Image (spheres, coloured by chain):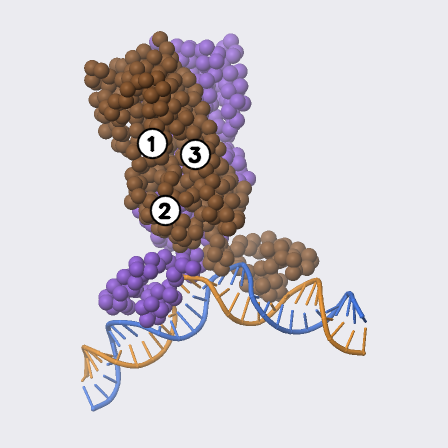
Chain colours: A brown, B purple, C orange, D blue
Amino acid sequence: MSVNITKLAEHLNLSISTVSRALKDSFEISEATKIRVREMALKLDYQPNPHASSLRRNVSKTIAVVIPEVANNFFALAIDGIEYVAQEKGYHVLIYITHEKMQKEVTFVNHLLNGRADGVLMSLSAETDNYNHLTDLKGKGLPLVFFDRTCDSIESSAITTDDLDSGFAATEHLIRAGCTRIAYLDLSRNLSISNKRMEGYYKALEKYQIPRDEKLILECTNNVSANEELIGNALGVSERPNGIFASVEKLAIATYYVCERMNIKIPQELKIVSFSNLEVSSLLSPSLTTITQPAYEIGKQAALQLFRYIDKKDLAHVCEKIVLKSTLIPRGSTKKH
Amino acid sequence: MSVNITKLAEHLNLSISTVSRALKDSFEISEATKIRVREMALKLDYQPNPHASSLRRNVSKTIAVVIPEVANNFFALAIDGIEYVAQEKGYHVLIYITHEKMQKEVTFVNHLLNGRADGVLMSLSAETDNYNHLTDLKGKGLPLVFFDRTCDSIESSAITTDDLDSGFAATEHLIRAGCTRIAYLDLSRNLSISNKRMEGYYKALEKYQIPRDEKLILECTNNVSANEELIGNALGVSERPNGIFASVEKLAIATYYVCERMNIKIPQELKIVSFSNLEVSSLLSPSLTTITQPAYEIGKQAALQLFRYIDKKDLAHVCEKIVLKSTLIPRGSTKKH
DNA sequence: ACGTTTGACGGAAACGTTTCCGTAAATAAT
DNA sequence: ATTATTTACGGAAACGTTTCCGTCAAACGT
C-alpha cells in the first residue's frame, strides 16, 4: 500500500541501507545522494513506519501521562504544558485516566512496561495506597516523573508545589479573617498533597493556638453527592465551622452548592479558601479565594525533567524534587465583615 | 533485557509459533498447552512487544485525538468520553493539541499517515480554512470521525450538536427576555459550529423581525486581551447591545470581565447567553445562562463511531452524521427585570 | 609503485511478533 | 488394512527499519 523504504530505494537505484542513512543525515553519505534521497522521499510521500523503527531501535518516541482526571482544570493545564514540551521534542503523548481507581493505575502501569512509552509522567490516584506497581516500573528502568500527587517511598523525580506552606498560608488567611473553627476538606489520606496541605493546616492552628478537632477533618471522596452530604452534615450542627479550607477545587464547589441550599452566607457565616485553578474564581458569587498552582508550568517542568532522563539514561538514578510556588489570591469568600 | 516470546518458548520447550497461538487462544492449540503457556507467561512476567505486533499485524491499537485545546471544559469532557470507550476496547489514546493553529493540524495529520494510529478523532482548529490534509487522510483510508467542529466538504462521520437550533433558541431566549440589540460573539468564520450557531441567530432575528446589523457580529480570536478590547469597544458605543450571544464559553467569560471593568450590570443592562460546559455556571455572579453540550457523550459517540470503522474497514465509506441535543439552561444572566 | 587510509555505498542480520505452510501422529472412514 | 481426516504442533517467512560488517574505488603517504 504505502511506500516504504524498499520502494524508495528501488526508485533511487540505491540500497536500503544507503537510503536509511541518507534520511538520517549520516556522515557516511555524500551530500549529493542525500539531496536526491530527500527529494524522492518527498515526491513519493514516504513516511517511515514508526513501529518498525521503534522495534529496531527500542524507543517509541512516546511518553505516557497517567492522571486521575482530565475534566479538571489543574490536570487539563498540566497536560497542556506536557504536550507543549513533547511537541518541541518531537514526542507523542499517550494519556491514561485512572478516575482515581488504583486498579486502573496498576493496569496502566503494567501495560507500560513493554516499550510502548519511553517514559511516564504520573499523578497518583486517590485510591492508591501501595506502590508495588511503581517499584516494578522503576525496576525496569523506565523513566518516571511524578507531578503534584507524588509518592515519597519511590525514588523518583517529582514536581510539586509548596503544599505545606500553602496549606499554612491558606489556614492563616482564614484565621486572620476571623475564623475560629476551620474545617479541612480532605480528598484522600493516601495523597501526598492532601497530607502536606493538612500539615500546613495543623501548623497554622498551632501557631494561633487553635485546638485541633478531628470532627473538622472531613474525609471526602470522588462521589459528589456523598461529599455534599458530608459537608452539609458538618454545617448542620450547632457548633458549625466558620471557615473551610478545601484541599481541591471540587470540594470548594461542593461547599458553594451546599451553602446555597442551606442558605449559609459566604463569607459572613462561612469563609472559604481552596486550592483551585478555576479560571472564573473571581466571577463566582462570592468570588473564591484560591491557592492557585502553576499547573501549566508544573506540566512543563515535569516533562522537561522526564526528557532529561530519556535523553541521558545514565541519569536515571538522579531524583530531583522541584518545588514551585503556589499563590494565595484573596477574594470575596474570605472577606472580613 | 525483558523476556520475549522466544525465551518464553525456550522455557516451555515449545516452538515460538505454538506459544504465540496459545497466547492468542487459537483453536489449534490444546487446552493443556494453553494453560501451561499462560502460567509460564505470568510467571516470567511476559509482556508482548507492541511494536513488533503492530509492525506485523499492521495495526497499532491506538487512536489519535486532535483538538484545538485541552484546557477547555468541553474538550476535557470529550476526551473523558473518548478515553472511556478506548479503554473498553483496549485501545490507547494519543492526544495532539493544535492551539487553533492550522499549521499544527496539518503537521499532526501528516504524521498520522504512517500507521501510528488506527483512526483519528478530530475537532478542527479555528484557523483551518482548507482541507487538503484531511483529504489525504481519507485518501489513505484512515478512519476519521469529526466531533463538534466538523468539515462538511470531507466525506466523513461527524458527531455534533444541534447548533443551528441551539443558536436559534439562545437568540430567541434573549429576545423574549427583552433584548433588542443582540451581539453575536464569533470565534472564527472557518468553524462549522460558529456558522451554524450564527445561522440560528439570524433565523431568530428574522422571526422576530429584528434587522441584522453587521456591527453586532464581533469576530473574536484566540487572543484574550484582543477579545476583551473588541467586546469593550462594542459595549462602549452609545447604541450598545443589550444582549450578547457568545458562541463559545471563553467569550462569555471575557464579556463578564469587561462588564465588571466597565461597570455594566448583568442582566439589567446586558443579558448574556453562551455555549458553555462550565460546571460552575450557576455559581457565577450573576449565574450564566448556558447552552450546554453533552460533551462527554459527544466524545463517547465519536469514539464508538470511529471503532465501527476500525472494526469493519469495509464500512469506511459510510458517513454518518449524528446530532445530539444541547440544552438551554436559563439562569441569572438573562433574567427579565 | 606500492601499501594504507578514506569516502561512499551494499548485503544481510537483527528487533519480536504473527501467520503461512508443513508434518507427524492419532483418529476416523472405507 | 489401507486411506483420509483431524489434532497439535514446528519451521520459517514476513512486517519495515536500523546497523553491523563488509567492499571497492579513489585519494593519499612514502
Mark 2 and 1 residues: CB-CB less than 8 Å, in contact? no
For residue A195, the mark is: 1
Q: Quadrant of the C terminus of chain A?
A: top left
Q: Position of residue B216 (x, y in %)?
A: 49, 19
Three-letter amino acid code at the position of disc 1 = Asn
Q: Position of residue B25 (x, y in %)?
A: 28, 62
The residue closer to the viewer here, A23 or A256, is A256
For residue A134, the mark is: 2
Measure the alpha-carbon separation of dots 3 and 2. 18 Å
**Same subunit under labels 2 and 1?**
yes
For residue A177, the mark is: none
Three-letter amino acid code at the position of disc 2 = Leu
Q: Which residue is mark 3?
A: A160
**Same subunit under labels 3 and 2?**
yes
Measure the alpha-carbon separation of dots 2 and 1. 20 Å
> Who's the residue at 48% across and 12% down the image?
B262
